[in-house]
Amino acid sequence: MSSTQKVSTYCYQCVNGPDMLTVEVKDGVATTVTPNFDARGLHPADGKVCVKPYGLVQKIYNPNRLLKPLKRTNPKKGRDQDPGWVEIEWEEALDTIAGRLNAIRAESLVDEQGYPRVAFTTGGAATPYFYMGTFASFLAAWGPVDQSLGAGGTVKCYHTEHVYGELWHRAFTVCPDTPRCEYIVSFGNNIDASGGVTSVRRHADARARGIKRVQIEPHLSITGASASEWIPIRPKTDPAFLYAMLHVLLHERPLTDLDVHFLKVRTGSPYLIGPNGFFVRDPASKKPLIWDARKQRAVPFDTADADPALLGSFNVDGLEQGADGKTWEHQGITVTTAFEHTRTLVKPHTPEWATAICDVPVATIRRIANEFVDHARIGETIEFEGRTLPFRPVAVMLGKGVNNGWGAFECVWARTVLMTLVGGLEVPGGLLGSTVHITGMDFDRMASVVPHPDGFLDYPFNPTDKEQWAAQPQVRHGHTTLIPIIGGGLTSQLMGSTVLTWMRLQGRAADSWGKPKPPDLWFVYRCNPNISFSETDKMGETMATFPYTVAFSYTQDETNHFADLVLPEAIDLESTQLIRLGGTHYFEQFWDSQGWVLRQPVVKPQGDARDFTWISTELAKRTGLLEAYNTMINMGAAGLPLKTDKYDFSLDVTRAHSVEETWDAVCRAASADVTDGQADDGLAYFKEKGFRVKPFPKINWYLYPRMEDLNLRFELPYQERILRIGQELSARLHEQGVTWWDKQLHEYEALPNWKDLNKLWSDAYEKAYGIRAADYPFWLLTARSMQYAWGGNVSLQMIREVAANVAGHDGIMINSKVAESMGIEQGDRIEVTSPVGVTSGRALLRQGVRPDTIVMVGQFGHWKTPYAKDLDMPSLNNLVPMNMDLVDGTGSAVDAVLVKIKKLGSKK
């Protein structure tokens, strides 16, 4: 008798998950993916899913899947080498891994240079953690693990927004308050391709009610195509446009047109700046001083009933506190405010100055700046969940390409200052943070709001003073040594300079630290750095030198080609995990509920694929770490603690537990979490219901009420802490003889000075590669594909069929008139050459591309991944240099490159 059932689960293939879905199963075979409409009214898109989950059925039954553990038999590693894979049983595979781990543990967990001998790399902005079961618990039980061997992080993420956003307003990522926003200025933020189904839904609703979006970017993206206006800006000139907007607001509009109250009481704008660049402080309390216009004297910033001055110069007494405890005592000095310093900084940066840099008309720049102010509704309020809050329906958004590398600090700073000038930061209608990773736990953003003595948000900088600075790097990119702003927490390694790690392994960087040894054992999961990183040919050569690599893989690919052992995990619809749901989390994921959602097997795993929790438990048993591993699960490494003062579902740490036992305990803890201890329903409940939620107060979408309650200020516009930390870091590094980070130290400015990024790139290329930058006249950029986001489904025919209907997925986009001048026709093959690599593809002629720009969608260029290798889709990654002169002060770089092109042949 035939049977049909619908099984609830989730998709988290990109950061915009989890998408809640159901899978129809007929006679044990998964057939159809459908939205989970039980989530209507809870999920921001009412349970709908984007295109990626629809490929999951095909993913299960892909004939190219790896379904048995594979062992390399050819000791030679290279792209031209056949690994000589042979199938083995799980017992042999697990014993082999455990044997190596036990040998490492018997000798030392770190090598003679102090670096962990075990490394772990994953991709997809850490989304694989929502698929790897309890493997994080195993890694935590193991001890030091190097996660600095990135697969694309700090090159392909919103890196500067992550770190400075969290410093300024607890915003690892930002989002307009889309349901209430009325005017968005977007510098390349391609949200309709990168924001998942919730973004598409929320922005479609916003367009229906009349929102205006101005899309400023070198090529017309998917999001730009649905915008109200497209402004084709010259690549890497966004800071000039933003600084010109600041000039208009600060020099061409009267102060009364801005949100003066917000600037006075919710920012550091009135703080007085001393002659050495630090706040002037009260000698007794050490608090920063402001000028009280009412009393006509300097007072501490938190003086009740003070009327802080924003403009003017003032004669004051006080002291400055500089780096390493140095102080200056002042009597009768003339000083001015942080606000005035900011006005001075942007005074030269007029729209007339910017037009020659950006190739955007003066009138357009000035109009956009004025429209931004005029739409801000300064002075208006809104009643929201019992609070009267400012209503500022405007936002400035930044895309990935302006959020990494040099110039990103200027962009993120200018954008956030613009929001403070109109009072639109963290209020209804304005620009909101979504989640935190550095300053607290991502599911409780409000708990990260801790006061700093200077009136700002406290922040867990890595120490830079002589006593506490970490002179010895913990991992190969030295994040705790080099980059104070990323902290030393659980996620900090992922935000260190992964470019530096790979360059060091190649002997091309950090000469005074020496070339590190590769890890003795490298775990790789759900990523393909030999495709997704830069200079991918060199990456492959580096991977080939690693002593032992274990890859958990779905198919053959370009990275596991160099592995020693390949293990088939039970994939998306075949395994079990419970994760958090709702609240605010990444981009447009703003819910009015929060809770937990289950991923469960809809069918039995194919072949010998195994659940990752089973794999983790087996490794814990074989390495003598079972008790430590179970302890980590009990402490919350699988999502939440299994024992609190309200409940106890903890596992017996002395024995191994099945997948079902483990997740039943987690489900019970989740039920108690949602119901405040009133329920203890386990795995069976979640298998039937799929998810469990409780209300999430919408007031927690906005940080402003919490700031108001604690009388805190946003640390803008002046970065006194950054200036002090930079001076201390410079001293520490120079005391150790480290001078190769000096260029990055220049970014530690209290106010970021504009940089000519096109000249910076040209100079770096000419210095490193001995070429003439003028011979490489095009910027090669990349664009996000919703269909292929994170690259986990490049081997699926269905996804290709869908993507083929979206412009840009068949080759290299080039301006039509430029192509005509070069004799290039639609479909002709063109060669693209950078100073470090060459690729080719079919020409796609477009009017919506600047004449100095060409564009490749996604991260392709495959030569091993089944099906993907036959798509003839080029990638810019092998053309992008890894170059220390292009790494900024936070350790990030950008996936853009100067290139030249030529026609290879006509279309067939």
Image: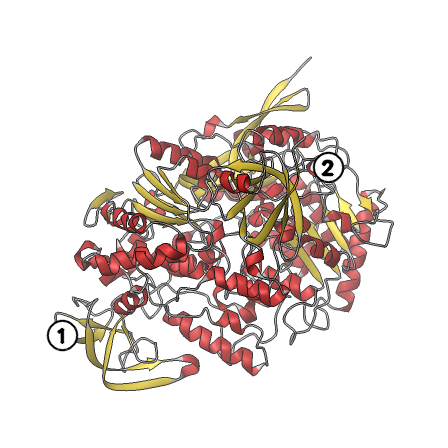
Task: Answer left or right for 406 relative to 602.
Answer: left
Q: Which mark is residue 726?
A: none
Task: Answer left or right for 371 relative to 117.
Answer: left
Quadrant in which the C terminus is drawn: top right
* Residue 794 point in image, percent of width and height: 64, 37
Q: Could you tell me which secondary element the residue under label 2 belongs to?
A: loop
Say which of 597 and 458 sits in front.
458
Q: CA distance from mark 2 to mark 1?
A: 74 Å
Residue beneath disc 2: 866
Say which of 837 and 606 sits in front.
837
Q: How is the image coloured?
A: secondary structure
Q: Amino acid at mark 1?
A: Gln
Say which of 219 and 319 sits in front.
219
Q: Label 1: how many residues lie within 10 Å, few (<14), some (14-19) or many (20+)?
A: few
Instruction: Tell which tag, 2 or 1, sits nearer the viewer.
Output: 2
* Residue 346 point in image, percent of width and height: 31, 64
Residue beneath disc 1: 296
* Residue 387 point in image, percent of width and height: 24, 47
Q: Where, by quadrant of the figure, is residue 297 drawn?
A: bottom left
Q: Could you tell me which secondary element the residue under label 1 belongs to?
A: loop
- As drawn, 412 above or below 817: below
